Amino acid sequence: MSNKLTIAMPKGRIYEEAAELMKQAGYDLGADQDESRKLILEFPEQNIQIMMAKPMDVVTYVEYGAADIGIAGKDVLLEQDRDVYEVLDLKISPCYVAVAGLPDQPMNRIAPKIATKYPKVASDYFREQGEQIEIIPLNGSIELAPLIGLADRIVDIVSTGRTLRENGLVEYEKIADITSRLIVNPVSYRLKSDEIDRMVNKLSEVMEGEEV
Ligand SMILES: Nc1ncnc2c1ncn2[C@@H]1O[C@H](COP(=O)(O)OP(=O)(O)OP(=O)(O)O)[C@@H](O)[C@H]1O
Ligand SMILES: O=P(O)(O)OC[C@H]1O[C@H](OP(=O)(O)OP(=O)(O)O)[C@H](O)[C@@H]1O
């Protein structure tokens, strides 16, 4: 009997694409779990268990071994810098992290304010640029901050660019391209290497098939 794998799946916008990829790899997670309120789902015939987690929390579950495997955005991995193995770029949910603000608006010269839900990514970026900044932590609607004079710039996800456009903001610099990644707990990787390798290989095959 093979070991059961516990997988932390991100609720929200990544879920559907991630579940579709898993399905093509032979792991059918059933109906659209976005419609369900159940947080732990068992699939005994496939020997897997799914945990429905907030995307930002997936890394925590995997780092502590509550889940063997997880799917997380590279943005989350850059922000959290946790002790997990990043084993596969799933190439789903593409977007990027960028610096944006009002057009033709120079940054305050002394400690410009940067609103973001990615304080580490933003601090690392501006430190590399030799800029001393002040982080204004926010959890959402980040684009509001420059509009109401709370911040000089934002560091946030851009996907279609629609949110920036509709709020009259412009992009100043791209910081990093983002896709979702398969992450693994280091201890699980040793103890359940057969099952994990099987899943990684199947997912890799699906992705290679899609590239041609
Ligand atoms: N337009 C986008 N905005 C935000 N995240 C995106 C976008 N496109 C792809 N992503 C990816 O999706 C992940 C976020 O998913 P989601 O928006 O469901 O999470 P969340 O922001 O934590 O949710 P919530 O808005 O409910 O707090 C990011 O970590 C990123 O990798
Ligand atoms: O370039 P776009 O396609 O417009 O996508 C980018 C927007 O999507 C995300 O916000 P989300 O929808 O997660 O809402 P939030 O502001 O509550 O985080 C992100 O923070 C941007 O605001």
Image (cartoon, rainbow, N blue to C red):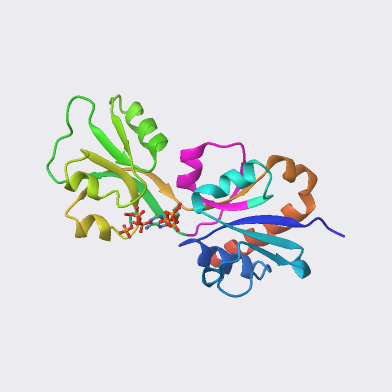
Q: Is residue 171 visible?
A: no
The quarter of the image holding the C terminus is bottom right
- From the viewer's perspective, is 108 left or right of 65? left
Residue 99 on image: x %, y % = 28, 42
Q: Is residue 39 above or below residue 57?
A: below
* Any part of residue 105 in sight: yes
Q: Is residue 108 left or right of residue 177?
A: left
Per the rendered image, the range of residues in magenta is 70-92
Image location of residue 13, percent across then percent down: 45, 62
Task: Please report the residue visible at 81 percent of the width from the left and 55 percent of the height from the top.
Answer: 3
Residue 35 location, x and y as percent? 52, 72
Q: Nearer the viewer, residue 8 or 207?
A: 8
Side of 96 relative to 210 (left or right)? left
Horizontal relation, residue 200 to residue 72: left or right? right
Q: Ligand 1 quadrant? A: bottom left
Q: Quadrant of residue 42?
A: bottom right
Is residue 56 rendered magenta in the image? Answer: no
For the point 47% across and 40% down, the residue is 78
